[in-house]
Image: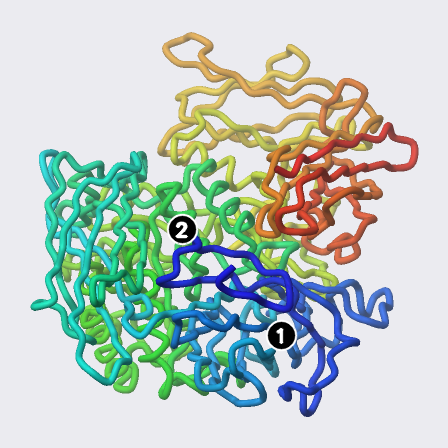
Amino acid sequence: MLLTVLCCVSYIASAQKFRYELLFDDNWKFHRGDIAGAEAPAFNDGSWRNVDLPHDWSIEALPDQKLGEVVGPFSKSSIGTTATGYTEGGTAWYRKSFTLKAGEPYTQSVINFDGVYMNCEVYVNGKLLAMHPYGYTPFDVDISSALNRAGQPNVIAVKVRNEGKNSRWYSGSGIYRHVSLIRKQPVHLAQNGVWASTESSSAEKAKIKISAIAESTLTKPTPIQLLIKLIGPDGKIAETVSVPASKVSPGKQIDQFITVNKPKTWSVEKPNLYTAQVDVMSNGKITDRTEITFGIRTIHFDAATGFTLNGKRVLLKGGCLHNDNGFLGAATIDRAEERRVELMKANGFNSIRTSHNPPSKQFLDACDRNGILVIDEAFDMWERPKNPEDYHLYFKNWWQKDLKALIYRDRNHPSVIFWSIGNEINERVDSLGLAIEKELVAEVKRLDSTRPVTEAMCSFYDHAGYKWESTIPAFAMLDVGGYNYMRSEYESDHQKHPERIMMGTESYAKEAFDYWQLVKKNPYVIGDFVWTAMDYIGETGLGNARLNDDPDKGFLRSFPWFNGFCGDIDLTGSKKPQMHYRDVVWENSMLEMVVHAPIPEGKKEIVSPWGWPNEWQSWNWTGNEGRTMDVRVFSNYPLIRLELNGKMIGEQRSGEDTKLIANFKVPYEAGTLRAIAIKDGKEVASKQLATTGKPAKIKVTADRSIINADRNDLSYVKIFITDEKGNTIPDADIPVNISVSGDGEIAGSGSASPNDMESVNSPICKTYRGEAIAILRPLQNGKKGSIKIKVDAKGLMRDELIVTLK
C-alpha cells in the first residue's frame, strides 16, 4: 500500500500514485473530559476507549444513572435544558497514531474535517496547527510541517469543546462527521479546486464550464497541463479536452467550456449525474487527479413564472431538517444521511432546507442521487447572540472563512439551488444587520454567482415596535425572500413589491392547506417549507398538544421530554397524523382518516402552533364505549360517507372551502370504521380503521436485509406489536428486549415517543403506538458475515431476522 498506518483504516481512493485520499475514521482513542498534556505524542492514552468516526458523545449514556435525574444520555441538570433535549456537551479529546511510508512522492499532507462540534484544536506531534470554532463547516489542516520523518509514528490529537449555552437545538458533540487524509505531490489541484456549472442547456446540447485551479510548491517554474474527461451518467466518456501549459499558471483559475450533445439533465424526476475527471500533468506525468460529480441543469427564478428547473415550473414541496439522525445523535453515518433523504422523497417532499446550518457532504450527495432540491443554510446568528456562547462570539472574524468553506465544498451539488445567509437574525433590519447582509450577499456572489441568495425573515417578536415594513431594505438585497410563518403578508407584499420572489421558509403543519393554496395560486410564491419535515432531538415538545391543566405552560415541555415532536415524520421514520393530511393536500393520497383521543371531562386541549391535535389512525379505544369520538377525514373527493360496522354515521362535504377536511362525531364501539369517497354519485375509494385483537406477537422487518460490511452502512429494523392476525396494535406501549449477535451491534434504538428517555439506545425499549426501531451496524469494515437480531417481550411470541453483510 502507498500508506501504512498503525491502525486499521478505510481507503476511499484507488491505488494511483499521483494522489492518495484516505478515509481517516477508524480506531481513534477517545476520552470524555479535559486532560492536560493530551496533545503530546508521548501521552499515555492506553486507558482511553476506541471509537470510529463519525462519533457523537452527547448521545451516549451518562455515568451515575438515576431515574428522574439522569436517564441514558439525558440529564435534568443539563445546561442546554429543553433546547438541547437535556443532553450534555463538555470537553473531550480524540487521538490517533499513524505512520507514513518512506519513498512516496507526496510533499503535502492535509487532514480534512467535514464537521466538528465545536471549538476544536488540532495538534500533530504536539504542535498546534489549527483552531476552528464553528461546528458545522468543513475545514482543512495542512499537517506537512509537523510530520515526523517517513517511517516514524505520528500522533494527531483533537480537543473539542462544546461548552456553555451555544445552541437552540441538539447539536451533538465531537468529530461527528468524516475525516480524510489527503496526500499530494508538489504539482497538484487546489483543495475543492475543481467545479462545474451549466452555462446553457437545451434538448440538443449543453454548454458546461469546468473550472480548475492548479498549485505548485516547486521553487522553479514548471509547465503544467490539464486533461479533462467528461463522463456521462452511463459511465461512458462524453468528451476529452486538453488544456495546454500556455494557459495554466499555478494559483490561476482556468475556465474550460465543453459542449455536451443531447445532455441528460438533472431533475427531481431524473437526477442524472455526470463526472468530471481532471488530471494535472507535469513533465509528461500525471501528478494529481480529482473527480467531481455534477448535474447539467438550469434554474430560473421570476415573480411572473415562479421557479423553473430546466425550463419547467417546479413547486417546492419543502421541509426543514435539523442536523441530527435521531437515536444516532449527530453522527453522519452515510446510510443514516441517505435514509433521511429517501424518507423525504418517499413522502412527497422535493426540497429540504438545512436548518439552520450547513449539512454534511454525504447528505448533499444523497440529495443529488435522489433528486431533492436544497436550501443550503449558513448561519443562525450573526453578531448578536441567541445564546451566550453561540457562534456570535466568532462571527466577525470567521464568517468569510466559513462561508467560503461552505460554498467551495457544496457548489458542485446540483441539488443545491439556494445559498441562505441566515435565519431569524436579531439585527436583520437595523443598520448593523443591513451592513452585514450587504457584505454577506456580495461575498456569496463573488464565490458563486450561479445560485440565488436568500434569508429567512420572521415577525418582530424580538423587537417591540418594529413593523413588517421594516423588512423592505433587507428583502431588497435578496434574490428570493424567505418568509417564516408570514403567509398573511404574501399578497399585500406582492402588491407593493411585484418583483419580489417569496417562499415560506418555515410554516405550521396545521396550516398546510392555506400555505399550499398560496403556492399553487401565486407564481411569485415558489414553495413552502414546513417546520419540520421530521422529528429531532431538542426544542422539547415544541409540537405538543397538552391539556389546559398541564403544569408545563408555553411552547416547550420539560424533563423527561427530549424530542421536538413537531415533525411530519417521527424519529423512527413513520408518518404522523400531519403527514397524512399533507399527503392529501399535496395529492399524494386522495383519502386519509384520523381519530382524536378522548379528552377528559372538563378539560380542553391546547395545541402548540407547531403541533397537531392528539389524533391517530386508530380505532382502538377500549374503555370509551358509547363515548362520542371526533373523526376527521382528509379527502380530495367532494363527498365523504362514514360507516361504523356497516351502518351509516353520516355524510359530509370535503373541498377547498373545508380545507379538504370532513368532520364527524361517532359513538365508539369496537369494529370497523370506514370512510367512503363519493364522486358523481358513485363510491370511488375507501379507507378503514379496524379494532385489533390483543397483543400476541412481535414482528420485525428490516429496511434492507443485505448491507455492506462497512461501518458506514446500517440496517433499520422496525419492531411491531401485533395481534394473532398480524395487525399492528396502535395503542400498544410494551417493553421489548432487543438482543444482537454475530458481526454487528446496535447503533441506536428507541421509539417515536417524545418523552420516553428510558427507551433511547437501550436494549429494553418500550414501543410507542405499537412500534419501535433498532439500528444495526457492522462491527468491522470488510468483514463479511451476518447480524442476527432477536426481539421478545413477556407473553408475546418473539421474532428474529438476519441481516447479511456482503
Q: Nearer the viewer, mark 1 or mark 2?
A: 1
| Residue placed under numbered mark 2 in the picture | 365
Question: x%, y% of residue 92?
Answer: 66, 79
Judged left or right of residue 585, residue 330 is right
Marks 1/2: CA–CA distance: 30 Å
At label 2, counting other C-alpha atoms closer than 10 Å, the crowd grade (few under 14, some 14-19, many 20 or more) is many
Going by the picture, which residue comes out furthest to the top?
Answer: 682
Going by the picture, which residue comes out furthest to the right?
Answer: 795
Instruction: State whether residue 85 appears in this view.
Output: no
Element assignment for label 1: strand
Judged left or right of residue 121, residue 519 is left
Q: Is residue 625 above or below residue 19?
A: above
Instruction: State whether residue 208 appears in this view.
Output: yes
Residue nearer the viewer, 786 or 310: 786
Q: Is residue 729 above or below residue 295?
A: above
Image quadrant assignment for residue 265: top left
Scheme of colours in the image? rainbow
| Residue placed under numbered mark 1 in the picture | 97
Question: x%, y% of residue 789?
Answer: 77, 38
At label 1, counting other C-alpha atoms closer than 10 Å, the crowd grade (few under 14, some 14-19, many 20 or more) is some
Which residue is rendered at x = 48% and y = 41% of the image?
342
Residue nearer the viewer, 708 or 515: 708
Element assignment for label 2: helix
| Mark closest to the chain's N terminus, 1 or 2 | 1
Residue nearer the viewer, 81 or 135: 135
Image quadrant assignment for residue 445: bottom left
How many marks on residues? Answer: 2
Question: x%, y% of residue 602?
Answer: 73, 49
Quadrant holding the C terminus: top right
Q: Is residue 399 above or below residue 301?
A: below
Judged left or right of residue 560, residue 203 is left
Q: Which mark is residue 11?
A: none
